[in-house]
Image (spheres, rainbow, N blue to C red):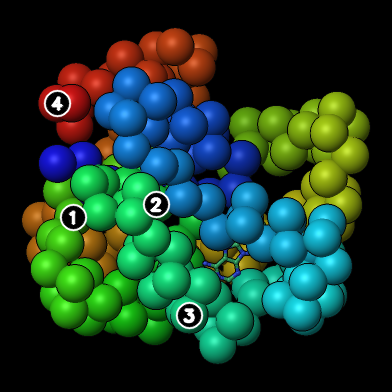
């Protein structure tokens, strides 16, 4: 049963790798960023509330995210596995996820930490901003997202490492090489 959590700074390649792996494992790729962006595009209630935070490079408040994850993991296609990308992003979300997974009896396999140096991340994100026109990929917002990552998300590395649930993978390699390392590490 494939149940993986992807961790790493913005621009580490979580989305790309999670998508590749979800295809080869035949489980859904659950990206909170994608879900939120589609909510914004469809101007749903959630989207209207989330847009402000996303454009500022802040985390969207937990009260908007936690229910969304609870519902998404309860969907039929998630019963036989999933790859989580972009969640959890702070200790509160990680604690919530622990409780939720216990409640629905779905233990995860491991947390994959994609490691990429800061200067590589910044140039990747600046390029993505130009190519995809994502409104949060401007240089000032990118720097702020990295700060938010350091402050709120990075502590999760020790959180999971302390429980021997963390696996680190070098994300600073060509996409296919990262995928290959990942497949080896998670043995899917
Ligand atoms: N779990 C989450 N908790 C709070 N906000 C989130 C979460 N996931 C995504 N977001 C919001 O969506 C934005 C984009 O997320 P994502 O696509 O994962 O981007 P990246 O990892 O490239 O920064 C984040 O900057 C944040 O505002």
Q: Which mark is residue 20?
A: none
The quadrant of the picture showing ligand 1 is bottom right
Nearer-N-terminus badge (2/1)? 2
C-alpha gap between disc 2 and disc 1: 10 Å
Q: Crowding at label 4, few (<14), some or many (≥20) Cα neighbours within 10 Å?
A: few
Circle 3 sits on which residue? Answer: 67
Q: Crowding at label 3, few (<14), some or many (≥20) Cα neighbours within 10 Å?
A: few
Nearer-N-terminus badge (4/2)? 2
Residue 43 placement (x, y as % from top left): 85, 67
Q: Crowding at label 2, few (<14), some or many (≥20) Cα neighbours within 10 Å?
A: many
| Quadrant containing the C terminus in the rendered view | top left
C-alpha gap between disc 1 and disc 4: 14 Å
Nearer-N-terminus badge (3/1)? 3
Q: Which mark is residue 84?
A: 2
Residue 64 placement (x, y as % from top left): 59, 81
Whether 167 is drawn above or below 54: the answer is above
Residue farthest front in this picture: 76
Residue 15 placement (x, y as % from top left): 54, 38
Nearer-N-terminus badge (3/2)? 3
C-alpha gap between disc 3 and disc 2: 15 Å
Q: Indicate left or right for 96 with 108 as reference.
A: right
């Amino acid at each position: 049963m494939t149940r993986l959590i992807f961790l790493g700074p913005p621009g580490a390649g979580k989305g790309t790798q999670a998508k590749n792996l979800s295809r080869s494992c035949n489980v859904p790729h659950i990206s909170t960023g994608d879900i939120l962006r589609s909510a914004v595009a469809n101007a749903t209630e959630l989207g209207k509330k989330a847009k402000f935070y996303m454009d500022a490079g802040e985390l969207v408040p937990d009260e908007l995210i936690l229910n969304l994850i609870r519902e998404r993991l309860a969907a039929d296609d998630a019963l036989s596995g999933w790859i989580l990308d972009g969640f959890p992003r702070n200790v509160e979300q990680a604690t919530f996820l622990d409780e939720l997974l216990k409640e629905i009896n779905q233990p995860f396999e491991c947390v994959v930490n994609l490691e990429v140096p800061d200067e590589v991340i910044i140039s990747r994100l600046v390029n993505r901003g130009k190519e995809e026109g994502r409104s949060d990929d401007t240089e000032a917002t990118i720097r702020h997202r990295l700060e938010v990552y350091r402050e709120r998300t990075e502590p999760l590395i020790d959180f999971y490492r302390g429980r021997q649930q963390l696996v680190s993978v070098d994300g600073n390699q060509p996409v296919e090489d990262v995928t290959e390392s990942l497949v080896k590490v998670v043995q899917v």
